[in-house]
Image: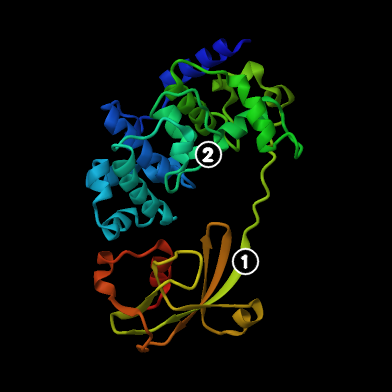
Amino acid sequence: MNNQNISNKILFWYDNNKRELPWRKRTSTKNREYYTLVSEFMLQQTQVKTVVPYFINFINKFPNLRKLAYSNERKILKNWEGLGYYSRARNLKKTAIKLLKEFNGKLPKDIEKLKSLPGIGEYTSSSILAIAHNKPFIPMDGNVERILKRLFLLKNKNEVSRENLNIKKSFFGFSKRSSDYAQAIMEMGALICKPILPLCSHCPLVENCKAFKKKDFVIKSKNKYNKVKYFEANVFRKKNKYLLIKNKKFGFLRNLVIFPMTEINKKQFNSLDFKKINVKMSNMNMKIVLNDYKKIKKISNSLLLDKSNINKYILPSFTKKIFSSLSH
């Protein structure tokens, strides 16, 4: 089967099965570029279903590039609250400023110029070129990788290497509808070629799929090692007032508000007879013991938060989880 037939099959499936996502709405060229930029930043490390409500709210608050560029960072972070990976929000604002200053408010059509923008790497630049500019790029996300691994039954380390996957990607060919085609392949991976229990009976490529012929759908995954780390969090509070600090100490949640914390070892953690909670952070499993002092201590660069007005503050989900675990 030639590449043209492949692209026609995939696009036919997409036209009849694609999800109605807010950043896919047909709008002006300027809005299409802006919607693509915001959605691609949000979709880094985050699932579509999580992003949708955040995207809608964000576009309502920051409807265009200029509004975003000149908005207060605190306001931007507040509307990003709960989405995690806050450096994305900061980089998005920096990119908006740079686009206005250096590119007349438009997304470059050159991949190297795109990669010069804060927070934009190989994958995001390819996505922007395909989706916003209809350029013949197929971004290599986890969905595309999974389809290729099953189509060609790729199992060993060399077969699943990024280099080999990029070679195998030529299977898809290209289409004049590059924007739709890039999204169609990713959509097919998300909805049909799922990690567990793929819906092969609905797949337009089932005749080409070696995994289907062998009935072997197990994916060779990258070894993701979640480190286990131990922390002691000190909760200084009096009535409704809680003492928190701006995080300058740990690499995670940099510059965001957290409870005063110290990393400890497993033996120290086990020896402390206080309430303990588990929190998952990216590639880290955090085991935290909570020292609840029920008094306020003076710490430089700290701030007192009133729990009754907690929604007024920009707090990461991490801090909110500790709040919710505290006894009243």
* Residue at the (42%, 75%) spot, across then down: 259
Which label is found at residue 122? 2
Q: Dot 2 lies on which element?
A: helix
Real-space Cα separation, disc 1 to disc 2, in angstroms: 30 Å
Foreground of the two, 100 or 284 = 100
* Residue at the (57%, 63%) spot, across then down: 285
* Residue at the (50%, 70%) spot, across then down: 250
Reading the image, the residue beneath label 1 is 228
User: Does the residue at mark 1 contact the one at mark 2 (Cβ under 8 Å)?
Assistant: no
Q: Position of residue 290 (x, y in %)?
A: 48, 79
* Residue at the (51%, 33%) spot, across then down: 190
Q: Is residue 282 above or below residue 64?
A: below
> Which quadrant is home to the C terminus?
bottom left
At label 1, which amino acid type do we have? Answer: Val
Q: Is residue 217 visible?
A: no
Q: Dot 1 lies on which element?
A: strand
Q: Is residue 176 above or below residue 182?
A: above
Q: Where, by quadrant of the figure, is residue 260 drawn?
A: bottom left
